[in-house]
Amino acid sequence: MNYEISEKEFTLNIDLHQRLTLLAKEGDLEVADTKQVRANLEKTLAVLADTPYLKFGLEAVPGFNGLASLMVAVEVVADISPSICLSVETSTRVFGKILTQWGTPAIKEKMLPPLLAGKLIGALALSEESMNVENAPLTAGGAVNGDTAEISGKKQYVINAPVADWFAVAGVAEGKSAVFLVKAGTPGLTVGPRKNTPGFQGAAIADITLENCAIPADQILMIPDGQNMLQTLRMWENQVLIGASLGLMKTAFDGARNHAKTHRSGGKPVIAFQEVGFKLSDMLTLFQTSQLFAFRTAWTTENVPADAESLTLCAKVFCSESAEQVAGEAMRILGGAGYETGNPVERASRCVKFLQIAGTSTEIARVKIGDAALGLRN
Amino acid sequence: MEFSFTKEQLMFKKEVIRFAKKEIVPRIQEFELKKQFDFESFKKLGDFGILGLHFPEEYGGGGADVITTVLAGEALGEAGVDGGLTLAYGAHTFLCADTIFSHGTEEQRKKYIPKLASGEWIGCMGLTEPNAGSDVASMTSTAEKKGDKYILNGSKIFITNGPIADVSVVYAKTDMEKKHAGISAFIVEKGTPGFSAGTPLIKMGVCTSQTSELYLSNCEIPAENLLGKEGDGFNMSLQTVEWDRSALLAPFVGAATFMLNRCVAYAKDREQFGRKIGQFQAIKRKIANIRIFGEAARNLVYRIAWCKDQKKPLNHLEAAVAKLFVGDWSMGPSNDAVVLHGGYGYCHEYDMERIFRDSRLAPIGGGTSDIQRMIISKLI
């Protein structure tokens, strides 16, 4: 057991903070048109590629502790730019893990080096309109015909869709779960208009449609028997959202604390009032509890895989709901200042809404956690 | 970061659960209803080695690390041991025995620790006063040195194990002019003239633990019963905070697992509207909430324990966060557990109402939740 952040992790956090703060000063990472989103992502990925950050969870990095180290670092990224965090993590961790876990040697050789060098942007196309708590089978898919496969289907809320180089489309091939790797621009692939969202406005999200989209058969990654593709992909998504929760809580808490120490009322800083001081105490309690929950979940994913799914769901519910509470309280502490567009607390308050909806929604997560405890579901 | 336990730690936890389910749990209902302390169960804890788990073997202890000690407390809660007994154990081992062990002379250690570790003697700690709760410096109990004796006067309140203790660690002021620096700690044995306990207080929960006032009326004790030096008392009481935020909170974490297991069993068995109630989403939600609370809380408690094992100075912020979370956030899950059981949850034999009542102490004992908020808001 070790509850300490290592010196290397600490140093990396400082380094990431400095590098990303510089980037954020060059231009707003949170409000951007699609072209700018792509440019922001390219710049950020290039910066991150100079650090061990992109490798976490995908390959061993000496001196670091895999996903646990990632969870420590991702808080820094999400604090500076939640949108960049969502985009980078979706590309690197979710798309990247699909490659490392299910990719053939040839696919890995072709796609992992540019991904780890920050020169490839990936997206996961998973959600379908018919999806529900019972994990209804995916409808996207297609038939293999010799060296090619033609796939069709509709996917919604695809993070990075308007800016991605490659799509990992989850679906069914030959009656089995499969991921189709589709290059941007492939005939038959249509990216819909970018979604207009209240939060994560520096990330690009859109629906996609695949109509008889032909891809080489070697771009179909078949999921081995015994593995639950949908559950695994959701777990990876949920872990991204857990990390984003930490960063948004940091933003909200730091903003509220700094305001409470500097804003004066009745001749004293407002933190001196118990109503404010106690709010901050509850916020910090939720934040620290979420951090430890997230770190243990990340560690468990790599070290006790059998416990990873249910613990991730628990952490996802706790961290995302805590983020909403912390951001809400932060706004109340800031008062009018917290309601002004451009204030990080205002931004965090908009972004946290997404965390409970995305991945496995907190409502569905609770059903699944209950089912697992009751032995009704794995 | 790394979150694994050793095989030995996990095996020991299992053993404690097995022992508690067999030896202690079957006796709880009887003593709960009578609101009496179960001396036999307490002695069994001593015989099993739990009461002195972390003390060195030469003092009759088990030589365990803090994490193992915390896991033992969690195991008791997980087995379904009542909060009264685990509170009595906590006050005995960590607030009394550990203070003597940590600050006592070799003679004091040899005289008291083996008997406390075995459960032959029961210990308590007298710190809180009617008008000095969280504001310890306001205490009015005095200790006046006369020759080779101290004369103690004053009263203490809410003292767990007060009516049954053989040995007490009592805090009193040796210098009324000073605030915290005027507080000293003394060992007072049962039967010392001028030292008495009140009748047990009738409490909402933790009913098998006996709680009372302690009265000091010209109570003469040998000067060698001073623990450490005069004026060290406040710091000694602060050192118990590490145990309070780890080992004393651990049974609450275990109780969450106990609630979860019991709720799951009930939901799988109980039928309404032609199906098991576990198939209703509202029931699943309650079960999920209990699980989520338990998983969130345990990390905070383990963190304090791990830091203590590493001999790191107590991080008061982290300690207050742990206490605040376990205290305040345990309310929802324990309420969910009662409601999930419906009418049965309101009845004694189903245990949930007991846990609900026992858990009400978590935001009060050892520093209320609002005191934790005061600490946190000052430290940030």
Image: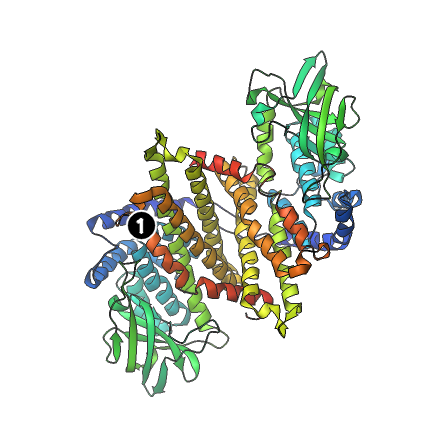
Q: Judge whether residue B184 can be spotted in this image.
A: yes
Where is the C terminus of chain B found, in terms of image quarters?
A: top left
Q: Is residue B116 left or right of residue A342?
A: right
Q: Nearer the viewer, residue A136 or A64?
A: A136
Q: Residues within 10 Å of mark 1 (few under 14, many from 20)?
A: many
At label 1, the amino acid type is: Glu
- Colour scheme of the rendered structure: rainbow
Q: Is residue A375 left or right of residue A115?
A: right
Residue under the point 65% across and 64% down:
B265
Q: Is residue B233 left or right of residue A274?
A: right
Q: Nearer the viewer, residue B11 or B294?
A: B294
Residue under the point 39% across and 59% down:
A355
Residue under the point 79% across and 37% down:
B120
User: Label 1: which residue?
Assistant: A346
> Where does residue B28 sit, x and y in percent of width and height?
75, 50
Residue under the point 56% across and 66% down:
A372
Q: Nearer the viewer, residue A261 or A105?
A: A261
Q: How many discs appear? A: 1
> Where does residue A97 sit, x and y in percent of width and height?
39, 66
Q: Judge whether residue A375 can be spotted in this image.
A: no
Q: Is residue B79 left or right of residue A254?
A: right
Q: Is residue B243 above or below residue A300?
A: above
Chain at numbered mark 1 = A
Secondary structure under tag 1 reads helix
* Residue farthest to the top, as pictured: B147
Q: Is residue A219 above or below residue B327?
A: below
> Where does residue A253 sit, x and y in percent of width and height?
38, 44
> Where does residue B338 sit, x and y in percent of width and height?
63, 56
